[in-house]
Image (cartoon, rainbow, N blue to C red):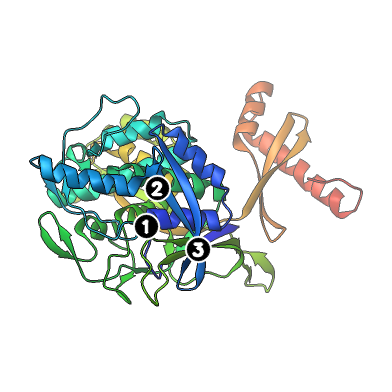
Amino acid sequence: MRIAYLDCFAGISGDMFLGALVDAGVPLAVLEEATAALKIGASLKVETVDRSGISCTKVHVMDDGHLAEKQEADARIDEQKTQAPYTQLPETQHLHKAGHAHGHEVVAEMEGHEDGHAHGHGRSLRVIRGLIEAAELTEPVKRTAIRAFELLGQSEAKIHNVGIEEIHFHEVGAVDAIVDIVAASAGIHHLEVGAWYCSPLNVGGGMVECAHGTFPVPAPATADLLRGFPTYSAHVQKELVTPTGAALLRAIEPVFGQQPAMRVEQIGYGAGTRNPKGFPNVLRLSVGSAEETTDALGRTASKPTETVTVLETALDDLSPQIIAWVAEAALAAGALDVMLTPVIMKKGRPGTLLTMLCQPAESGALERLMLRETSTLGVRVRQEQRFCLDRHHAPVQTVYGEIRIKIGSLGGEVLNAAPEFEDCRAAAMKHGVALKEVQQVAIAAYQKSMEAAKDGDGATV
């Protein structure tokens, strides 16, 4: 299985992630096409830079031909001089990029501009979501990018005790941050890795100036995004993890720890703007395949692991009809599995434990489905590892027509084989026979084909 490992010894930011993706072999065209799809006048400029003797890739976001981060910084300075601020938001700094602090003020939303520009003003989550949804991007890329911004919005809303739609992003709503997240999402999906892994995060140290005062690193919203992640502070007294970097990590939900056993095929180094003496301000991305392991019987086999998200809520005041509908809707929306478990809740009330299993990128949509369609007030979310057999279908011919056999194997050895239920049901209905009879005939046909293959007569499955 193809996997990727992020080494965040110097933290992580959106532009560092972009640089690492390009340096690790993601075609620049993939990121450029995602950027152009936003139709906000943005483009990318790539250069090779030196960071403490390491050759790295630096990706700059350009806004109408000018460096976006500088334009946004100048716009904020002018705004602070000429306008009375509205609601103050804490500072969200991109010190990997510009190396200076910016206060956040919420300003009037510029929704009437067809080109998607907010001209230096804050953008709401609704506006950013609209930009992404309107772009010509694949659905997985859109979901990951929107998920990252929703996570940012949730953290900001929690910090300020306001509704998520009341939040106006300033720096993370700027052109460079939007491009960072969307282009990184495109690169992430282009890699087609089955699992992401990540080192503990070096958040840096020191203090940052926020609109409400001075806070220790990491800043409040970033700290909220990093909840549950392993972090430490070392080497420099600067902010090393930015909100965009933290949100992207939260969106892909990597497994944290040491690099897993893997055969590394590509290594990419993405550079931040700052270049402190004696400290390489880079993000390292390693991409390769999971190393082979030995099973309990001493056989060498690939260990197919992946990270999945588990969503769970208990319901004791909802019609079983609606619960069944939610389960069907979740599967249609991309859930890997849905389970309904009878439970006894408080005050002796019988209830149902609704559990959904999904890919991390799908969790945002399924969380919203749970909250919108059920009576729950909250959803539990956790990440788990699962070990899967390699799976494929092999058709067999029976007196009832062709039936697919679902085969599970490990290291080339077949461990499980079962007829596909829907094929058997359709055949049983068509021929007016018992479902179990079709299943038995299909299994017998499969076993016969396996025996023929062993005898060497050329039959295969």
Q: Which residue is mark 2?
A: 180
Q: Which of labels 3 and 1 is toward the front?
A: 3
Q: Amino acid at mark 2?
A: Asp
- Does dot 1 land on a helix, a strand or a loop? loop
**Mark 2 vs mark 1, CA separation in Å:** 9 Å
Q: Residues within 10 Å of mark 1 (few under 14, many from 20)?
A: many
Question: How many callouts does the rendering have?
Answer: 3
Q: Which residue is mark 1?
A: 13
Contact between marks 2 and 1 (CB within 8 A): the answer is yes
348 and 333: which is toward the camera: 333
Q: Residues within 10 Å of mark 3 (few under 14, many from 20)?
A: many
The quadrant of the rendering that contains the C terminus is: top right
The mark that comes first in sequence, 2 or 3, is 3
Residue 37: x and y in percent read 46, 33
Q: Amino acid at mark 1?
A: Ser
Query: Height in image: 13 above or below 330?
Result: below
**Mark 2 vs mark 3, CA separation in Å:** 17 Å
Please give left or right for residue 280 compared with residue 157 in the image. Answer: right
Q: Which residue is mark 3?
A: 56
Residue 393: x and y in percent read 68, 42
The quadrant of the rendering that contains the N terminus is: bottom right
Q: Quadrant of residue 413?
A: bottom right
Q: Amino acid at mark 3?
A: Cys
Q: Residues within 10 Å of mark 2 (few under 14, many from 20)?
A: many
